[in-house]
């Protein structure tokens, strides 16, 4: 039977612990969240029926600062999942060395089945159950899968009504006019781009000869494709849930996306004029590919930016990329990780590669607490500095111990947490 997300997280912890000399008491404390809330949220649906939804908030560890982590609305949300995600948030914040701890929340719900009115009641109802345990100095939630800046706005409003004072830093990922930060919409991708640039330098790759495939064309993947393309990197393949396109001569992600807007799928284009993918299949270098094929393309850098568990024991032997930059959370299973290391494929792990998102969330919190608003330029400069420093530290640790970058990030992160806990 395949392992649960939390079991996988604990395997990763154990791997790092073998390298470092972690205090045994702290090791035991890092095997469970400090607090795990389970709440029942009653919502009167539009048809008058009362439904009870189950919600969670896992507060894993706050040694470095207030707990920080998103709230997920999904039918697969579970206690195991929020525990794992809150543990990874702890590692992520500590890897990039921001003063935040690890938290995560979620509600078991398919939000697509709810009206806007029901969604607002559910979001406010969740805060009514957890408000005593959150706050800008305690625990700072944020958006995650299927939660949006508008939902964050409802939650901030409900929290402030309950505590009776303004506290914009209680939640991040808000709209700009509601105290949000510049760059938030593309922060995860931008952080990932800095990681690609650092990796390319280490490998002596120049942008126009660095070939990249990106799986997933949502917030993370689409911004990543566009920014890398604008910097001169050669994007040869992009995909979404319906499949992808591959052009070994290089794609323009904006053009591929424009075709999706017209025809529903990411597409190839003929030189000079846009044509849907079926028209060009077979007559040009551009062709339709499946997500499975995309993962196995002969590229320099593969960027999984969609779902977890994409590179597994079943396909890892076919991976031809020289490096992987994990924009998605958990795209590689621990078993596949071992084989990638044996094959000499460098993996820039999720806890580092997609940490741009939480870093800009931290900036939002910092601005809110200080009553400031930073310009886009200021945010980008601060983000770049933090991401490059973290990359260099993880690379150094990897070289020092002869380990993979994921284990190196964990070693670095757990050392920081331990130092504060001792
Ligand atoms: P999103 O919902 O905006 O986009 C997801 C994309 O994946 C969509 O293009 C969808 O079509 C595609 N997709 C779905 N199923 C697929 C499949 N089977 N094969 C290929 N593509 C598929 O989500 P997002 O915010 O871009 O997040 C993507 C990943 O990045 C997730 O793992 C998320 O946890 C991680 N992440 C995102 C952020 C952020 O700020 N958005 C921050 C940290 C980590």
Image (cartoon, rainbow, N blue to C red):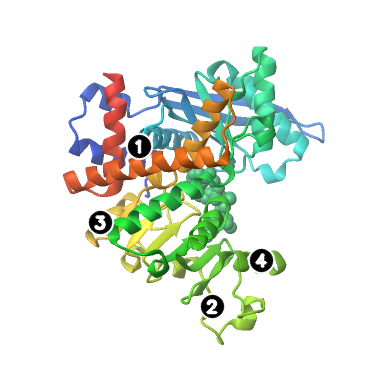
Rendered image quadrant of residue 284: bottom right
Mark 1, residue position: 95
First-in-chain label (2 vs 1): 1
Rendered image quadrant of residue 417: top left
User: Picture coordinates of residue 325 (x, y %)?
Assistant: 39, 54
Q: Nearer the viewer, residue 193 or 283?
A: 193
Which mark, by number, is residue 341? 3
Q: CA distance from mark 4 to mark 1?
A: 37 Å
- For image coordinates 44% across by 33% down, the residue present is 86
Circles 3 and 1: CB atoms closer than 8 Å? no
First-in-chain label (3 vs 1): 1
The vertical placement of 74 against 36, above or below, is: below
Report the residue that reaches farthest toward the bottom: 283
Circles 2 and 1: CB atoms closer than 8 Å? no
Mark 2, residue position: 287
Q: CA distance from mark 4 to mark 3?
A: 38 Å
Rendered image quadrant of residue 343: bottom left
User: Picture coordinates of residue 247 (x, y %)?
Assistant: 50, 75
Query: In what element is the residue under mark 1?
Result: helix
Circles 3 and 2: CB atoms closer than 8 Å? no
Q: Is mark 3 within 8 Å of ligand 1?
A: no
Q: Can residue 291 be seen here?
A: yes
First-in-chain label (3 vs 2): 2
Circles 4 and 3: CB atoms closer than 8 Å? no
Q: Nearer the viewer, residue 407 or 365?
A: 365
Mark 4, residue position: 258
Q: Characterize the local packing of mark 4: few (<14), some (14-19) or many (20 or more) Cα atoms within 10 angstroms.
A: some
Q: CA distance from mark 2 to mark 1?
A: 39 Å
Query: In what element is the residue under mark 4?
Result: helix
Q: How many marks?
A: 4
Which mark, by number, is residue 337? none
């Amino acid at each position: 039977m395949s392992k649960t997300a939390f079991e996988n997280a604990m395997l990763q912890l154990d791997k790092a612990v073998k390298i470092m000399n972690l205090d045994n008491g702290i090791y035991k404390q890092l095997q469970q969240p400090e607090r795990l809330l389970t709440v029942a949220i009653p919502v009167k649906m539009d048809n008058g029926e009362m439904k009870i939804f189950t919600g969670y908030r896992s507060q894993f560890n706050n040694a470095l600062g207030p707990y920080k982590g998103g709230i997920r609305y999904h039918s697969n949300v579970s206690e195991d999942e929020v525990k794992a995600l809150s543990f990874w948030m702890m590692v992520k914040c500590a890897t990039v060395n921001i003063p935040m701890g690890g938290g995560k929340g979620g509600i078991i719900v398919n939000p697509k089945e709810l009206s806007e009115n029901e969604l607002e009641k559910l979001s406010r109802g969740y805060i009514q159950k957890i408000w005593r345990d959150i706050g800008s100095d305690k625990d700072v939630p944020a958006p995650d899968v299927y939660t949006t800046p508008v939902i964050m706005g409802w939650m901030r409003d409900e929290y402030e009504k309950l505590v009776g004072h303004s506290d914009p830093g209680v939640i991040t990922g808000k709209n700009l006019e509601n105290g949000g930060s510049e760059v938030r919409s593309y922060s995860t991708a931008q952080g990932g781009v800095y990681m690609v640039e650092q990796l390319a330098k280490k490998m002596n790759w120049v942008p126009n000869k660095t070939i990249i495939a990106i799986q997933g064309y949502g917030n993370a993947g689409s911004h990543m494709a566009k920014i890398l393309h604008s910097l001169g990197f050669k994007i040869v393949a992009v995909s979404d849930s319906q499949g992808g396109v591959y052009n070994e001569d290089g794609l323009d992600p904006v053009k591929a996306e424009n075709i999706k807007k017209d025809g529903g799928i990411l597409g190839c284009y003929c030189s000079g004029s846009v044509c849907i993918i079926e028209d060009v299949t077979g007559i040009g270098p551009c062709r339709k590919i499946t997500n499975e094929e995309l993962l196995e393309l002969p590229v320099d850098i593969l960027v999984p930016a969609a779902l977890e568990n994409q590179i597994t024991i079943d396909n890892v032997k076919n991976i031809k990329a020289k490096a992987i930059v994990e924009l998605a959370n958990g795209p590689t299973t621990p078993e596949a990780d071992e084989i990638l290391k044996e094959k000499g494929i460098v993996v820039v792990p999720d806890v580092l590669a997609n940490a741009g998102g939480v870093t800009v969330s931290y900036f939002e919190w910092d601005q809110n607490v200080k009553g400031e608003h930073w310009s886009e330029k200021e945010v980008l400069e601060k983000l770049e500095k933090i991401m490059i420093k973290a990359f260099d530290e993880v690379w150094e640790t990897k070289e020092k111990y002869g380990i993979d970058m994921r284990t190196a990030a964990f070693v670095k992160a757990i050392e920081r947490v331990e130092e504060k806990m001792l």
